[in-house]
Amino acid sequence: MTTAPKVIFMLSHSEEGGASNIWADLAQAFAAKGYRVQLAALYPKAAGVLSKERLTQVEWIYAVPDRPRSLLGSAGMFWSLVKLLRRERPDVVFTALPAANAIVPLAAQVSGTGLRVVTSHHGPISTARKYLDVADTLAGSLPSVDTIISVSHSVSNTLSSKPTTYRKKRAVIHNALPPRIEANLEALYPAGSRRTMQARLLAATGRLAEQKNYPTLLRAVANTREIHLNIVGSGPDEQALRDLSDSLGLQSRVSFLGSFPREEALGRLSQADVFIQVSLFEGHSLAIIEAAKLGLPIIVSDVPEQIEAVTLRDGSRAGIVVPTLDPESIGAAIQQLFDSAAEYRLWSDRASMLAKESNFDNLVCAYEAIVNQAR
């Protein structure tokens, strides 16, 4: 009887985010197919926290219990990772986030176990620190790395300056939502429904950090009339954003709702009329897919990853694309969408078309094919 392959899905850290959600979803899908699976991170999301992360049936393991704070600590983490790989002896390790992409391939080589590594990029390489970009180039060229996944063609294109040995390993696999989230969204917005505007409510979701470009969004909302913005998320920029909102006179029109468990956050999103995400960069935004599944008209920034995310297979757009740093133009696009019932119906229908093109089974099959290829 053939033993099922052992697969580890590893991140730099286990903090909640798009990459960790995808890894947790894939781990559970692989486990359901009979693979031996573990979720892993170089270190936990917070010092000394080794409890089970989120709601998953797959065990989390760590190279070290705390994030290293020195070169000596980083060296210790590397050797702990080598020991972990020798102990667990996986057939394949999928990695996500820059540090894991850079460190795991070398640790795999040193471990002498013959395991194969598949690295992945969930955002443009230009957003990584320069030393991690260089380390990623070296690591991705090692024999231990079989495949280098990007979650969009736009992200893959940011790797075009890498060496030929590296570039030949590239593959693109778009993100998708797992069945439990699909079911949750279906309950909130049943198939065949037609969305109508209810409360002139605009929604944005995501970490309150520079990437999401919230200052521009707030200034755009200040250029609109009778539109309320709900922001779902928390992060380091929250107080600065609250102060900016107040200075723009938006106290009664912008609500900072904070963070919620994923299913509850979807409930908040479903109450909106329009979804907006004017990020400075993304990979392949799960939030856009969630909004599309809810039939929400979608407004995104004109960065390559976002344009790709709202482009249908026939090349047409399923979302409104706006200049990333132009609050006047963004505000005008928001206002037009809210003021025109015809425009609203059009973009709601286009969003539903985008939703139909996203399929989790295809995602799992693509990753599974890499495992079988790597054996």
Image: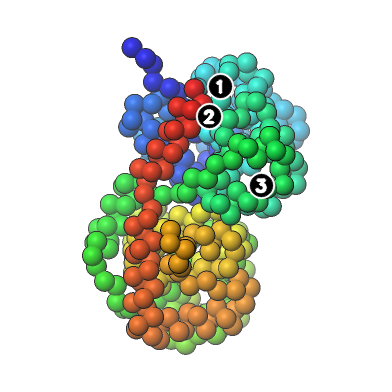
Q: Residue furthest top?
A: 1
Q: Earlier in the sequence, mark 1 or mark 3?
A: 1
| Residue 209 in sight here | no
Under mark 1, the amino acid is Leu
In the drawing, does residue 16 fall left or right of residue 161?
left
Residue at (47, 63) in percent of width and height: 315
Tag 1 and tag 2, C-beta contact below 8 Å: yes
Tell me the SS state at disc 2: strand
Tell me the SS state at disc 3: loop
Q: Earlier in the sequence, mark 1 or mark 2?
A: 2
| Cα gap from disc 1 to disc 2, whole angstroms | 7 Å
Res 159 label? 3
Look at discs 1 and 3 and give the one toward the viewer.
3
Picture colour scheme = rainbow
List the residue tagged with mark 2: 93
Res 115 label? 1
In the drawing, does residue 210 fall left or right of residue 275?
right
Give how far across and how far down residue 235 sits, in percent: 56, 58
Give the vertical position of 312 relative to 122 (above or below): below
Q: Quadrant of residue 169?
A: top right
| Cα gap from disc 2 to disc 3, whole angstroms | 21 Å
Q: Residues within 10 Å of mark 1 (few under 14, many from 20)?
A: many
Give the vertical position of 349 relative to 164 (above or below): below
Along the line of sight, which residue is nearer the eye, 150 or 215? 150
| Residue 297 in sight here | yes
Residue at (27, 57) in percent of width and height: 186
Q: Residue furthest front?
A: 314
Along the line of sight, which residue is nearer the eye, 260 or 350? 350
Residue at (41, 43) in percent of width and height: 363
Q: Residues within 10 Å of mark 2 (few under 14, many from 20)?
A: many
Q: Quadrant of the N terminus?
A: top left
Q: Earlier in the sequence, mark 2 or mark 3?
A: 2
